[in-house]
Image (cartoon, grey):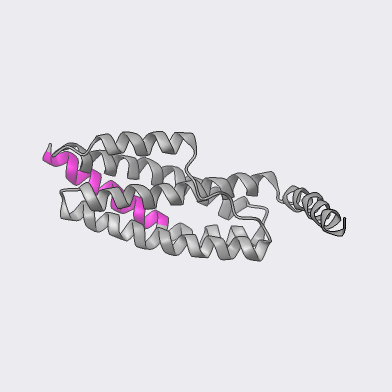
Amino acid sequence: MRALATILALLVSVPALAAEVPPETQKFVSNVAVANKFEIDTSNLALKYAKSPDVKNFAQQMVNDHTAAAKDFKAALEQAKIPPPPDALDLTHEAKYAKLRLFTTESGFDASYMNEQLKAHEDTVAKFKEYAANGPTPEVKDFAAKTLPTLEHHLSMAKDLNEKLNSKS
């Protein structure tokens, strides 16, 4: 009976903790988790299927930087006492990942991967800028501000590589 009471008390307290997280923070946290996983997963595909050494180098940097960002993100969530979101892609990103896997042809993968990277980083930079400026949770806001320069660098690299790949076509 005592164990049941303890379990019930825990179940009741978990929603209370989650309810304290501002909706803007919850949305940002979910977006960060999905975007980071997408970057790592698609970049691992690129390490396997890309033909261009430049694309492979970019992919390796994405894996390294986003793995480090994931650790910083987890630490920020722990400081803010926010439960981490699931380590999974949402349906939109699952579809993008599946589509990218189809472009493993000689000429298709590199351009498709880099196009996805460009779009993903444009979206992510915008979300990080917004949260770094206006986010209500200080620990997560600090993470966004600290990570933003790296993401802006990734965006610049993605733009340059896209231009380079498109000029070869």
The region drawn magenta spans 151-168
Q: Which residue is drawn at 35% across and 54% down?
A: 154
The residue under the point 26% across, 34% down is: 102
Q: Which of 41/29 is in front?
A: 41
Most frequent secondary structure within the magenta stretch: helix
Residue 91 placement (x, y as % from top left): 47, 34
Position of the C terminus, as image quadrant, is top left
Q: Taking 168 as reference, is 147 above or below it?
A: below
Position of 91 relative to 118 (above/below): above
x and y percentages locating residue 19 in the rendered image: 75, 47
Does residue 60 lie above or below 110 as drawn? below
Horizontal and vertical percent position of residue 112:
26, 38
Q: Which of 48 and 22 is in front in this view?
A: 48
Q: In this view, does 55 lie to the left or right of 93?
A: left
Q: What percent of the width, then of the height, locates residue 67?
A: 42, 61
How many numbered marks appear? Answer: 0
Q: In which quarter of the image is the N terminus?
A: bottom right
Query: Residue farthest to the front?
Result: 1
